[in-house]
Amino acid sequence: MTDIERLRAWHKAHVGITEYPPNSNNVIFNTHYYGSPVSGEPYKWCVVYQWDAFRETGLAHLFYDGKKANSCRVLRDWAKKCGRWVTEDFRPGDLALLDFSGKRGDPTHIAWLDRVNGSIFWSYEGNTSATSDDNGGAVMYRTRQVKLITGAIRPRYRENDMAKYHRQDGVDIVEVPADQLRIVMTDHAKKAAPAASYVNGGFFASYIENKEPFTLPVAHLAADYEATSVYTNFYTGQRAKLRSLKRVVMDSSDYKTGNEAFYGKAISTLLLQNGMAEISEVTTLPDKIQYAVSGVPVMRSGEDVIFNTFVKRQGWEAGNVRATWHVFIGLKENPARTVYIMGWKTTKSNMIKSAEAYKRFRAMGFRDVIKLDGGGSYVFSVNGRPVSSTSENRRINSILCWGDTEETGNPHAVPTTTLRKGTKGEGVMWLQWQLTSLGYDCGTIDGDFGSKTLAAVKAYQKSHGLTVDGIVGPVTRQSLTS
């Protein structure tokens, strides 16, 4: 049962409960809230009724962060502060705040939305009646006009706040609630990032340390600090505006060496704060920003960007947008509650001058898009399953991650028969999953052993000293499982 289904069942079971005696405000919900029977005008209970619904269904943490609240104004101010306030597109499960004065002023009543259809909604409400909307003494199922809603609180129901993965027009897409997204400063090979759901982010400022390519982000970054190498500690110590054991903030206005192209410039940056995401051009990061990462502007305010002026002025070069694999961040509103993290291989030498990227993302309904990492490869892992991965596996400096952190293994059964081009089924999905997790590009994990899977198998066999025939028999299968 979902969170919303659980609340709906609870509300249905309580319809018809009334104060006793009438006009006393003596009702079980007030007893639960205050700890003893109460009476008198100060204890109007429409909000207390909703508080009790969340408490008794085990969802108290979704209502005012688990604290007690008996005021519409308090809830409204809290929702605005934590990014849970909506003023349109009302949905089942929203807590609608109502104003019966018609002046769109302070709300005086609260309703749990069960259904919304055009200009009408149906709701469960406490302390209402057919003759006294906001002090009627009963639990009722009401039908009202949407125009009465001044705004609504959208709780973080599990079913609404889970990241969703899909693929559209050749683009890997994960929709992540903004308050679920983290940016982490790390130092791992791409396919070994310490998260089950992640994509590599940032850009590369190349160094060689201990005979190994080593990278650090350019421009702005505000992230959790989970890097452990001596080199990361040294370089971030030089560049960071703030760096502690758990937190790092790099601001391009504060360091220049190795960052000359971006120093002191207004750079397109994803900013995450209070459950909201925004893409904005900033010279320096706002104080106390939660997370931030910079990228090449691709689409701003629904319009294409001009490469030779808008993009180059920020310090980016043509090589940053060449034809290769890239990671993109997209918003359909700005600010927005949902962040779209996307992986896509472009084909034009300059995706911005050619408008290749703009046309693709405009058709998908985006308003603002920036490009993050590229460098010819990315790893896109969702719930421990690499859904798209290319062969290069260089070390990375930052990741965007979300959801669970416990990794899961290959969900497909190990095949017991030989696989070759033309084979279809779950055994091929196992093969594609294994190859993708190791950094070999099979395209979509679709169970169809086609040309891309064949090329990936041969590349794997070659790199592991096996017979390069593109056939997955016992020897190659054993190598893939070890």
Image (cartoon, rainbow, N blue to C red):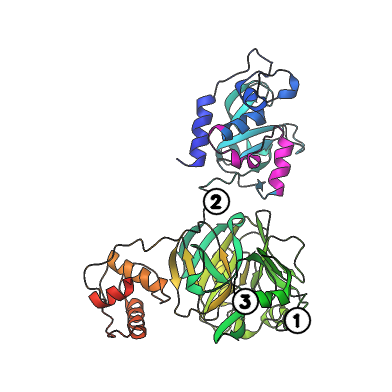
Of the two numbered discs 1 and 2 in the rendering, the one whose residue sits closer to the viewer = 1
In which quadrant of the rendered image does the C terminus lie?
Answer: bottom left
Residues marked 1 and 3 touching at CB (< 8 Å): no
- Mark with earlier residue (3, 2): 2
Say which quarter of the image contains residue 288. bottom right
- Mark with earlier residue (1, 2): 2
Looking at the rendered structure, the secondary structure element under dot 1 is loop
User: For the residue marked with disc 2, what is the amino acid?
Assistant: Asp
Instruction: Tell me if residue 469 comes above or below residue 74 in the rendering.
Output: below
User: For the residue marked with disc 3, what is the amino acid?
Assistant: Val
Q: CA distance from mark 1 to mark 2?
A: 39 Å
Residues marked 3 and 2 touching at CB (< 8 Å): no
Instruction: Tell me if residue 7 comes above or below residue 172 in the rendering.
Output: above
Tell which of 157 and 139 is nearer to you: 157
Residue 178, given in percent of the width and then of the height, sits at 61, 57
Residue 144 part of the magenta segment: no
> Label 3: few (<14), some or many (≥20) within 10 Å?
few
Say which quarter of the image contains residue 225. bottom right
Q: Which residue is at a point 66% across and 31% down the rendered structure image?
A: 47
Residue 173, given in percent of the width and then of the height, sits at 50, 64
User: For the residue marked with disc 1, what is the amino acid?
Assistant: Lys
Q: Which residue is mark 2?
A: 161
Q: Which residue is mark 1?
A: 256
Q: Residue furthest front?
A: 230
Q: Which residue is mark 3?
A: 230
Residue 322, given in percent of the width and then of the height, sits at 56, 83
> Label 1: few (<14), some or many (≥20) within 10 Å?
some
Q: Residue furthest top?
A: 21
Q: CA distance from mark 1 to mark 3?
A: 21 Å
Q: Which residues are magenta?
A: 56-81
Q: Which residue is at a point 77% across and 62% down the rendered structure image?
A: 287
- Mark with earlier residue (1, 3): 3
